[in-house]
C-alpha cells in the first residue's frame, strides 16, 4: 500500500498527515469542506475565534 505525506490546512493551522494514496483525494476534499464551513459560520454567526467555528463544525458533522 502506497502511503503519501500530505498537509491539510484547517483554521490557519497546518496538519501533516501520512495517508494511503487512495484516501488522499477524500481527505483534501473534506479539509476544503471544513474550511468552507468555518467561513460560513464566521460570516453568519457571532464567532469569536477559529476554535468556536471548529467546535460548531464538529457539532454539525456529528449530527
Image: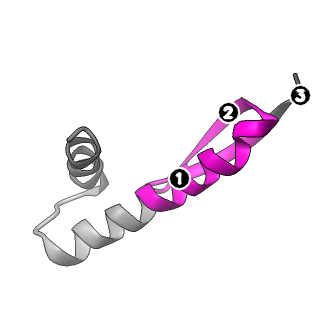
Residue wearing tag 1 = 31
Give neighbour class at mark 2: few <14, some 14-19, many 20+ (Cα, 10 Å). Answer: some
In the image, taking residue 13 as reference, residue 39 lies left or right, namely left
Dot 2 and dot 3 residues touching (CB under 8 Å): no
Q: Residue furthest right?
A: 2
> Label 2 near label 1: C-beta < 8 Å?
no
The residues bearing labels 1 and 3 have C-alpha atoms spaced at a distance of: 21 Å
- Residue 13 spot, x, y in % from top left: 51, 49
Q: Is residue 29 left or right of residue 3?
A: left
Marking on residue 2: 3
Disc 2 or disc 3, which is closer to the eye?
3
**Is 36 positioned to the left or the right of 26 in the image?**
left
Query: Residue 17 got which mark?
Result: 2
- Label 2 and label 3: CA atoms lie apart by 13 Å
Residue 58, given in percent of the width and then of the height, sits at: 27, 42
Residue range (magenta):
5-34
Above or below: residue 32 compared with residue 51: below
Say if 55 sits above or below 35 in the image.
above
Amino acid at each position: 500500500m502506497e502511503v503519501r505525506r500530505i498537509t491539510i490546512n484547517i483554521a490557519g493551522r497546518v496538519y501533516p498527515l501520512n495517508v494511503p494514496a487512495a484516501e488522499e483525494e477524500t481527505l483534501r476534499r473534506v479539509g476544503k469542506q471544513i474550511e468552507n464551513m468555518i467561513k460560513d459560520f464566521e460570516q453568519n454567526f457571532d464567532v469569536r475565534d477559529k476554535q468556536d467555528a471548529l467546535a460548531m463544525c464538529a457539532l454539525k458533522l456529528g449530527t
